[in-house]
Image: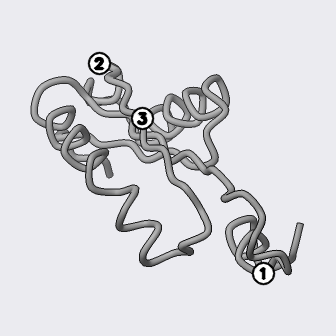
Amino acid sequence: MSKEGPLNAIASQDNPEAAPETRTLGLVAAPDMPEAIATRLAAELPALLKEHVDDRICWKVPVVSDPFIGSGDDEPKVLDIARDHMLDQQWDVAVSLTDVPVY
């Protein structure tokens, strides 16, 4: 892997005719409004990421609803929950969405 980071390492590969790499950006959302927003984002993000990050990467964007993300817990716990989903699901990146302030 390049020192530039995992996504840039993919972009700098020498074989442009190789099968596209697949990367997964998982969205971990609190129920209700955050989950609805995450579902809309999941439909739009693959094309946007392909256009703005690297057109040789095929993006998957699954959505997981987790009530603990919106429970008002402190920031480290929310981040731990998102990280646990990322590791369990073998995602490359995880983003958590909540409608509760996180300080």
Residue 52: image quadrant is bottom left
Looking at this view, is 12 or 67 the one in front? 12
Separation of disc 1 and disc 3 at Cα? 26 Å
Q: Secondary structure at mark 1?
A: loop
Kindly identify the amino acid type of the residue bearing the numbered disc 3.
Pro
Looking at this view, is 83 or 21 the one in front? 21
Looking at this view, is 63 or 96 the one in front? 63
Q: Secondary structure at mark 3?
A: loop
Quarter of the picture holding the N terminus: bottom right
Kindly identify the amino acid type of the residue bearing the numbered disc 2.
Pro
Picture coordinates of residue 89, whole percent (x, y) = 60, 26
Q: Residue at x 48, y 44 (%)?
A: 60
Residue 98: image quadrant is top left
Picture coordinates of residue 2, whole percent (x, y) = 87, 74
User: What residue is disc 1 on?
Assistant: 12
| Circle 1 crowding by C-alpha within 10 Å: few under 14, some 14–19, many from 20 | few
| Circle 2 crowding by C-alpha within 10 Å: few under 14, some 14–19, many from 20 | some
Sequence order check: which comes first, mark 2 or mark 1? 1
Dot in front, 2 or 1: 1
Q: Residue at x 59, y 34 (%)?
A: 86
Q: Is residue 11 left or right of residue 97?
A: right
Looking at this view, is 82 or 103 the one in front? 82
In the rendered image, the residue lying farthest to the front is 17
Separation of disc 2 and disc 3 at Cα? 16 Å
Residue 67 numbered mark, or none? 2
User: What residue is disc 3 on?
Assistant: 62
Q: Residue at x 57, y 49 (%)?
A: 93
Q: Is residue 28 left or right of residue 32?
A: right
Dot in front, 2 or 3: 3
Q: Secondary structure at mark 2?
A: helix
Picture coordinates of residue 14, whole percent (x, y) = 85, 80
98 over 48 or under it: above or below? above
